[in-house]
Image: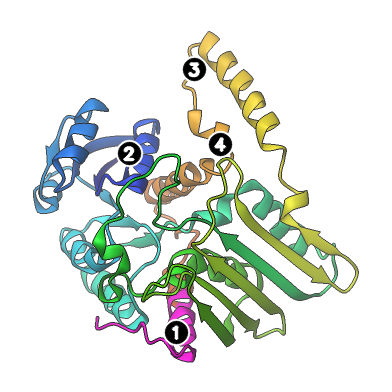
Amino acid sequence: MIKIGVVGIGHMGKTHLFNLMKNKNVKLLGVADQSSRARAFAKKMGVKSIYSNYSELFDEPELQAVVISLPNFLKRESLEAASEKGLAVLIDKPLARNYSEAVEMEKIVQKNHSRLMVASNFRYHPHVKKMKQIIDDGNIGQCKLVSLDYINHGPFSHPLNPKPVPDWWFEKEKVGGGALIDNGWHMIDLFTWLFGEANVENAIFDHHFNLELEDFANLTIKSKNGVLGVLNVGWFSHVLFPKLDFRIICHGTIGYCNTDELKPNLYLNAAKEALINFKRKIFFQPINILTYSYYFSSYNEVLRDFVLCLEKDEEFPISLAQQLMVQEIIDKTYKLSPINTEVEG
């Protein structure tokens, strides 16, 4: 059993907290957050040890690992504090605000002989895993052209449930960029996971909300083995959940593959999972409510792999070297844009 803590109980931190509390291979030792509201939420969830400062959490003598779910500008310092305690770390994407900062974080981990994994959860969507298997099996021949789209509302809440957006979301020195580093991280990660090392060819950034940071972008990247990718990302859409404006289409020499054709009907899937959970409840087995949403189950799988690798002392399935490549591609893309979003590390 791995003894874990959570730093940051915002939107993603709450998801991680819920999944950890349902994981039979985990003992949750505590959480840390500066927000009194977040700490009150953790207390309501039944967390016993709650801190306002993560350094107090890291002093827990039995602590082995920590999930860091903080704003981009706080990731490096929190990773360093955890790493100095010898803790393994699971951190939300993006890894850092820029490539140089990401390299510094890699050096910190190496210096302290600790371990780091980035929670790039889109790899765990069932229809994405099916697509990878189809490609790897050669069922569409040699893939030549791929399009990847991910459009959502970014930091903005849906108008049906309005919430204020923290100021740091729009300060480039704190976040590193806009829709590209946020949504684009997932798309670049998927492209390089599917097709290997790649480089950006060109990029176009634009603004729907007249923000300093880009809120939508189009870019082309090319893998070393000749696969051309066209990526579209944005923050301008308020599509209603459970729908998600995300897809990958791969065009090969003997066929094609579209993730939209590989995923189930989301409403039928929710009904099926409800029946499965009802059966579990009858036999006094733990239920998993996140499976209703289809997409949210990926966060649970990321945590599961993180914990299992720590238990078995195995390499993480999401390598730090590959995530550094994603960060480097994002840096190069911003340098192609007339809007300079590069920040000091």
Q: Amino acid at mark 4?
A: Ser
Question: Which secondary structure, mark 3?
Answer: loop
Q: For residue 17, which numbered disc appears in the image?
A: 2
Q: Which residue is mark 1?
A: 334
2 or 4: mark nearer the eye: 4
Q: Which residue is mark 4?
A: 293
Distance in Å between CA atoms under marks 2 and 1: 33 Å
Q: Are marks 1 and 3 in contact (CB under 8 Å)?
A: no
Q: Are marks 4 and 3 in contact (CB under 8 Å)?
A: no
Disc 4 or 3, which lies upstream in sequence?
A: 3
Nearest the viewer among 99 and 138 is: 99
Q: Which residue is mark 3?
A: 285
Q: Position of residue 53 (x, y in %)?
A: 10, 50
Is residue 153 on the magenta stretch?
no
Question: Which secondary structure, mark 2?
Answer: helix
2 or 3: mark nearer the eye: 2
Disc 1 or 4, which lies upstream in sequence?
A: 4
Question: Which secondary structure, mark 4?
Answer: helix
Distance in Å between CA atoms under marks 2 and 4: 17 Å
Q: Are marks 2 and 3 in contact (CB under 8 Å)?
A: no
Q: Can I make out residue 334 in this image? A: yes
Disc 2 or 3, which lies upstream in sequence?
A: 2
Question: Which secondary structure, mark 1?
Answer: helix
Disc 1 or 3, which lies upstream in sequence?
A: 3
Q: Is residue 159 above or below residue 97?
A: above
Q: Is residue 94 above or below residue 296?
A: below
Quarter where residue 99 is shown: bottom left
1 or 3: mark nearer the eye: 1
Q: For residue 249, which numbered disc appears in the image?
A: none
| Magenta-colored span | 325-345
The residue under the point 42% across, 46% down is: 303
